[in-house]
Image: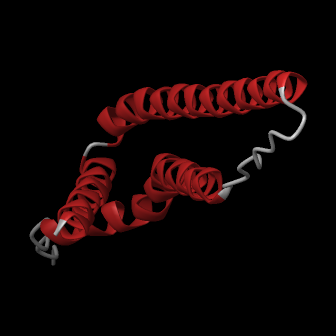
């Protein structure tokens, strides 16, 4: 159930951003600057939390092993969360950059062609 809701929200966000980038490039440029800054801040906070948690866990393990020599706690190395988070951040950054730089260049010729097609044909002079 939750996966369906998340997939729908992701689809809505992707299609909304694509529509905004195609129809309103200046507005999207402003929004993409904000989204990239938010993405970098969230990424930095996530990695700072992971590094801090890992360092705290290792310090606790060292202190506990000094008190009781037989006390053995395996250090968890669950890097799947970090891997998925890293892939998600990279995919979001690539998508935002694609829409910001490549999409306007791809659609510029299309817009010029559409402008000429919308005009009624001019009558030829004899």
Above or below: residue 28 compared with residue 96 = above
Q: Nearer the viewer, residue 69 or 77?
A: 69
Q: Is residue 36 left or right of residue 6?
A: right
Q: How is the image coloured?
A: secondary structure
* x and y percentages locating residue 37 in the rendered image: 51, 26
Q: Quadrant of residue 61?
A: top right
Name the quarter where the N terminus is drawn: bottom left
Q: Residue at x 89, y 23 (%)?
A: 66
Tell which of 88 and 20 is nearer to you: 88
- At x 29% / y 59%, what residue is drawn? 10
Count of numbered labels shown in the rendering = 0
The residue that appears at 46% across and 28% down in the rendered structure is: 38
The front one of 78 and 2 is 78
Q: Is residue 90 left or right of residue 8?
A: right
Q: In the rendering, at what x and y percent does residue 4 appear?
A: 20, 70
Q: Quadrant of residue 112?
A: bottom left
Left or right for 5, reference 31: left
| Pick the front one: 115 or 63 | 63
Residue 82 in the image, given as x and y percentages of width and height: 63, 50
Left or right of residue 96, residue 63 in this image: right
Percent position of residue 74, x then y: 77, 49
Please determine whether, in this image, residue 45 is positioned above or below residue 10. Answer: above
Q: Is residue 16 above or below residue 52?
A: below
| Quarter of the figure with the C terminus | bottom left
């Amino acid at each position: 159930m939750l996966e369906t809701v998340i997939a729908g929200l992701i689809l809505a966000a992707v299609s909304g951003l694509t529509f905004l980038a195609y129809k309103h490039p200046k507005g999207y440029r402003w929004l993409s600057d904000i989204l990239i800054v938010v993405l970098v801040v969230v990424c930095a906070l996530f990695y700072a939390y992971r590094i801090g948690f890992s360092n705290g866990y290792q310090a606790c393990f060292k202190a506990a092993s000094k008190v009781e020599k037989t006390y053995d706690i395996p250090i968890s190395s669950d890097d799947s969360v970090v891997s998925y988070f890293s892939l998600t951040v990279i995919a979001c950054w690539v998508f935002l950059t694609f829409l910001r730089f490549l999409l306007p260049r791809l659609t510029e010729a299309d817009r010029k062609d559409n402008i000429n097609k919308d005009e009624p044909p001019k009558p030829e002079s004899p």
